[in-house]
Every structure is written in C-alpha cells, then in structure tokens.
Amino acid sequence: MDTRGVYDGLADEFLTRPGVTVGKALQNEVLKVSDKIFAFLKDDRLVVKLPAAQVAELIAADDAVPFRSGGRTMREWAMLALPADGAAGWRGWMVQAHDYVAGLAAGQ
C-alpha cells in the first residue's frame, strides 16, 4: 500500500476517537484533537507533533527530518518516512502525537 493509503486508513481509525476531527491547515488536510493539529501527511511523510526534545532525538538518530513551514523549522514537529512495518509504525507515532496534543489542550 502507498503512503497515502496507509495514512488515509489510519486517519479513518483516528476519526472514530472522541474529539478527533479533520481540517485544513498548512496547505494540507490535518487531523486535530480538541481543535489542535496532531498529524498530517506531507510529501509522503507523516508529520506529527511531539515534545521538542523527542523530535530532536528522532532527528539526531536520523529517524525523522525537521518539518519546516513558512521558511522556519518547527521544533515540535517531525516528518517520518513510512517504516518497514508500515501502518503499525505510523499508528504508534500518531497515538503519541494525539495523546501529547490532547494533553496540551487539556492543560496537562
């Protein structure tokens, strides 16, 4: 399955969760929780919002590349290629991003 197919399948799963919606931002269709973006597909890579320190570790380990928007690097956003385990790998990152953003929205 191609990256779009994998992402669309996962997006459908997340849209069954409470508070998860789809929207348009950053010139992409995005997944939101509590009206805050947590994941989207950009150039065949999954983009997720995670704690800045975790993003820095992923980039340092060459597991992700920085996400840039408007000419600047977004420190809480990582771009991940489709891993060998496909949907399972991306699902894990999306769960982490969902939980992180939901926690931020709830003030945790």
Image: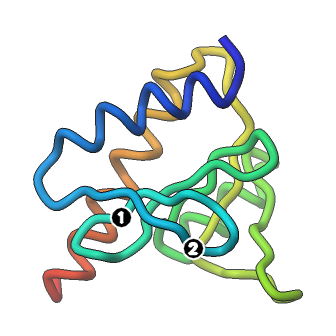
Counting other residues with Cα less than 10 Å from the Cα at mark 1, is it few (<14), some (14-19), or many (20 or more)?
many
Q: Amino acid at mark 1?
A: Lys
In the rendered view, tell whether residue 72 sits above or below residue 101: below
Residue 11 x/y as whole percent: 41, 39
Horizontal side of 66 relative to 16 (left or right) equals: right
- The span from disc 2 to disc 1 (Cα, nearest Å) is 10 Å
Nearer to me, 95 or 10: 10
Nearer to me, 74 or 58: 74
Nearer to me, 10 or 91: 10
In the rendered view, tell whether residue 29 sits above or below residue 66: above
Residue 1 x/y as whole percent: 66, 11
Q: Amino acid at mark 2?
A: Ala
Horizontal side of 58 relative to 52 (left or right) equals: right
In the rendered view, tell whether residue 91 sits above or below residue 107: above
Nearer to me, 73 or 27: 27
Residue 25's label in the rendered image is 2
Residue 16 x/y as whole percent: 18, 39
Which residue is located at x 69 percent, y 27 percent?
3
Horizontal side of 81 relative to 21 (left or right) equals: right
| Tag count | 2
User: Which numbered disc flags the more N-terminal residue, 2 or 1?
Assistant: 2
Q: Which residue is mark 1?
A: 32
Name the colouring of the figure: rainbow
